[in-house]
Amino acid sequence: MKISKMWFATLAALAATTVLLAGCGGAGGDQPADQVSQANTASAAAAPPLGTEQSFAVLGGQTVTNTGPSVITGNLGVSPGSAVTGFPPGIVAGGTTHAADAVALQAQSDTTTAYDNLAGQTCTSDLTGQDLGGKTLVPGVYCFSSSAQLTGVLTLNAGGDSSAVWVFKTGSTLVTASNSSVLLINGGQPCNVFWQVGSSATLGTTTTFVGNILALTSIALQTGAKVSGRALARNGAVTLDSNTVAAATCGVPPVTPVAPTVSKAFSPGTINAGGVSTLTITLGNANATAATLALPFVDELPSGGRRQHQQYLHRAAAHSQQRALAGVVRHRHLEGGLDGRLDPGQRLLYGDGERDRASQRQLHQLDTCRGLADKQRE
């Protein structure tokens, strides 16, 4: 009885210790505010469908204005407004300027579709009131009921998944402090980062920014700010000042070619007397692109079958010699199920050079035996 009471007391103490650990932030406690891990953030983020706006680096609703030597890599456009100023000194490289034309109009329509798609995605983490600076975020949908602020470095960790997607949703503004930056690590791509801004976005001087900004109203890039992504303003202006904006496209991971498959089949597998068997060779290409058959196809019959064929020839030749000495020169060819006869003076040819030569040697032996039989009769 004493042992039982002691054991019960020990279990009770362990239970109390477990409750104490849980209350002190053990396995079930909150994580530091600067780190959001995969454990509590389901990666429900999905890239929205992109249409014509995919080719645009900068798209304004009313105007696009520039000061200084900005470089835009991709299309630049405005719609329904038509004013584009500051090019030059700004440069549009690898793209075209579309001012109130059909292309810009369609790009704005597609931007609205993508904006609505992002707005409808379910939040996996609410960061309202928190500065994004100093955080390391895994893929997910991060929401702010009002404004979002970035001061310092925001790190986006893809965890080795090049298709990882981040979506940031703000109820009003997006603002970055000077010299702030967004850093992608472990395979993340700028094309898969999306910022759905409820009003306007402002990137501070010399900010290095990553992702596609889709703002309901306007976007302002202050002096020296750089964007690897897109600046797409639906209703207002895009203002530039000595900036670099490059439309980001998702890279395609290298594909390892798959070797072609080869299969062979005889039909039928047994050849009856006077019959024919068809050999079908099938080549398969499991790659995503077409394969060109540029090299000769070389195949060999099974070595066992070839040896059996040669052994048969030797036996047939010896048998023919014996029959020739007896005054009867006949050869019965049974290979492959064929039933043919080789009488004196006839020639039986095979389908390849090796068997032709074997046949010729056999016929030479038959002719020799035939001459010996004739001399014996004399």
Image (spheres, helix red, strand yellow):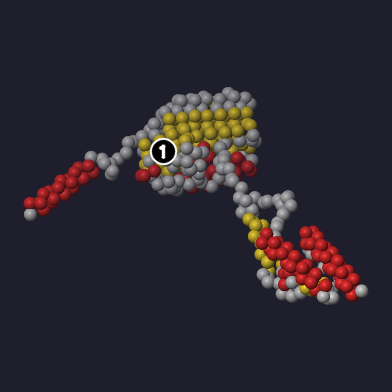
Asked if residue 31 lies left or right of residue 61, the reply is: left
> Which is more toward the observer, 82 or 37?
37
Q: Residue at x 61, y 47 (%)?
A: 257
Q: Residue at x 74, y 52 (%)?
A: 296
Q: Position of residue 44 (x, y in %)?
A: 43, 48
Dot 1: what SS?
strand
- Residue farthest along the left direction in this orientation: 2
Q: Is residue 12 visible?
A: no
Q: In front: 76, or 99?
A: 76
Q: Is residue 143 left or right of residue 354?
A: left
Q: Where, quadrant-wise, is the C terminus in this rendering?
A: bottom right
Q: Is residue 122 above or below residue 67?
A: below
| Residue depicted at x 18% and y 46% | 14
> Which of these two is toward me, 167 or 137?
137
Residue 285, above or below 248: below
Tell me which amino acid carries mark 1: Leu
Q: Quadrant of the N terminus?
A: bottom left
* Residue 229 placement, left or right of 363: left
* Residue 228 image point, x, y percent: 53, 34
- Residue 198 point in image, percent of width and height: 45, 40
Q: Which residue is denoted by mark 1 in the rendering? A: 137
Q: What residue do we see at 38% from left, 41% from top?
A: 37
Q: Residue 246, located in which quarter of the rendered image? A: top right
How many numbered discs, if any?
1
Mark 1 neighbour density, 10 Å: few (under 14) some (14–19) many (20 or more): many
